[in-house]
Image (cartoon, rainbow, N blue to C red):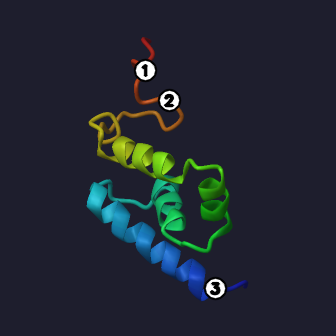
């Protein structure tokens, strides 16, 4: 079995904390992504900072996590939150 690095363990702990704040009951990719963005020296953070979009991406992700659509139980993971749900 392959183990986790201390850095990954820290990221997963931060992701768990973020998931608790959003009250969704599970850690999602979005929580892990936010936790990675908190790692100043992570490659994704460095790339996004160099492209000058780090703050914008972090703010948009926070906006989505705080949106009513995110907290709707029937949300579809891959649907844009500003689009109406498909009619059946």
Position of residue 65 in the picture relative to residue 5 (left or right): left
Q: Which residue is mark 1?
A: 83
| Image marks 2 and 3: residues in contact by CB distance under 8 Å | no
Residue 48 position within the rendered picture, expressed as x and y whole percent measured from the top left = 62, 54
Residue at x 48%, y 68% (from the top left corner): 38
Residue at x 46%, y 33% (from the top left corner): 76
17, above or below 55, in the image? below
Position of residue 64 in the picture relative to residue 2 (left or right): left
Q: Which mark is drawn over residue 79?
A: 2
Marks 1/2: CA–CA distance: 7 Å
Q: Quadrant of the N terminus?
A: bottom right
Residue at x 27%, y 61% (from the top left corner): 21
Q: How many residues crowd around disc 1 within 10 Å: few (fewer than 14), some, or many (20 or more)?
A: few
Which residue ends up furthest to the top in the rendered image? 87
Q: How many residues crowd around disc 2 within 10 Å: few (fewer than 14), some, or many (20 or more)?
A: few
| Image marks 1 and 2: residues in contact by CB distance under 8 Å | yes
Secondary element at image label 3: loop
Residue 64 position within the rendered picture, expressed as x and y whole percent measured from the top left = 38, 41
Residue 80 position within the rendered picture, expressed as x and y whole percent measured from the top left = 48, 29
| Image marks 1 and 3: residues in contact by CB distance under 8 Å | no
Marks 1/3: CA–CA distance: 39 Å
Quarter of the image for residue 83 reads: top left
Marks 2/3: CA–CA distance: 33 Å
Q: Which residue is mark 3?
A: 5
Secondary element at image label 1: loop
Residue 73 position within the rendered picture, expressed as x and y whole percent measured from the top left = 32, 39
């Amino acid at each position: 079995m392959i183990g986790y690095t201390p850095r990954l363990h820290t990221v997963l702990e931060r992701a768990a904390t973020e998931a608790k704040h959003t009250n969704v009951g599970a850690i999602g990719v979005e929580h892990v992504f936010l936790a990675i963005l908190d790692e100043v020296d992570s490659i994704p953070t460095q790339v996004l900072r160099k492209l000058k979009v780090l703050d914008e991406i972090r703010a948009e992700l926070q906006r989505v996590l705080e949106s009513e659509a995110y907290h709707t139980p029937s949300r579809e993971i891959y649907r844009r939150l500003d689009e109406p749900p498909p009619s059946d």
